[in-house]
Image (spheres, rainbow, N blue to C red):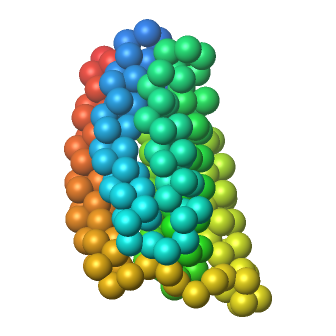
Amino acid sequence: MENKNSLHWGSHLFSSEVQEDDVVLLYKYRLLILVTLITGLLMWTYSFISIFFVEAQALGRIGVSCSVVHAFSPFIYRLTKSMKIAAYSMVTAGMIFQFSFSFFTGGFFSPTLLWFAVLPLIVGLLTNKTHAVVWTFLSVSAYVLMFWLQKENLVPESTINDLGRTLAQFMIGLGLIGLVGGFTVFFLELSYFYYQKGK
């Protein structure tokens, strides 16, 4: 009985794989477009906040550059036919901007660091569990790095004004609610899709 439960636990929760045929890749490509649109709205809004409400001019340039790279992720997939490259380009741009925004707006105590928690989820949905684990490690490492920078007094004083801080806080609250809700729907749809595919 114990062996049977162990087999069920291992084979269905951690070890099951779905072959990525053309139908699965098309589904993931559509998911990539949706994720790019949703997170792109957040990226460009943060870029707007960086340009108009943060004194550090470098942050605005970083935000626009990262947002452009982020927006091109579906085209990168069409060019390379690699979902891994497309997903990595999108979340790498997002991480660089999130880290930079936090660095100039409070460092380790900036609530913008919460966005790191979303990155492994995005990569995992678009690729597989291996890359989700990789990005979990990368996100934790970036979070700890910010703590170290703060501890060593290498983080500058926050240069965001009160209105910008309020807008950023709204983006975190509303953005996380929207993303978690959206990803929940995506995950349920993806699970149903794989279930139907396995019949």
Question: Residue most toward the top?
Answer: 22
x%, y% of residue 60?
A: 50, 59
Tell me if residue 62 comes above or below residue 196 in the rendering: below
Residue at the spot 48% in from the left edge and 48% down from the top edge: 64
Quadrant in the picture for the C terminus: top left
Residue at the spot 69% in from the left edge and 66% down from the top edge: 141
Residue at the spot 61% in from the left edge and 51% down from the top edge: 135
Q: Quadrant of residue 188?
A: top left
x%, y% of residue 132?
A: 56, 47
In the image, 65: left or right of 162? right
> In front here: 57 or 122?
57
> In front here: 64 or 4?
64
Residue 187 shows in the view: no
Question: Residue most toward the right?
Answer: 152
x%, y% of residue 49?
A: 37, 65
Tell me if residue 70 comes above or below residue 178 in the rendering: above
x%, y% of residue 81?
A: 56, 15
In the image, 63: left or right of 151? left
Tell me if residue 35 comes above or below residue 22 in the rendering: below
> In front here: 108 or 68?
68
Residue 168 shows in the view: yes
Q: Quadrant of residue 168?
A: bottom left
Tell me if residue 66 comes above or below residue 118 in the rendering: above
In the image, 51: left or right of 16? left
In the image, 136: left or right of 196? right
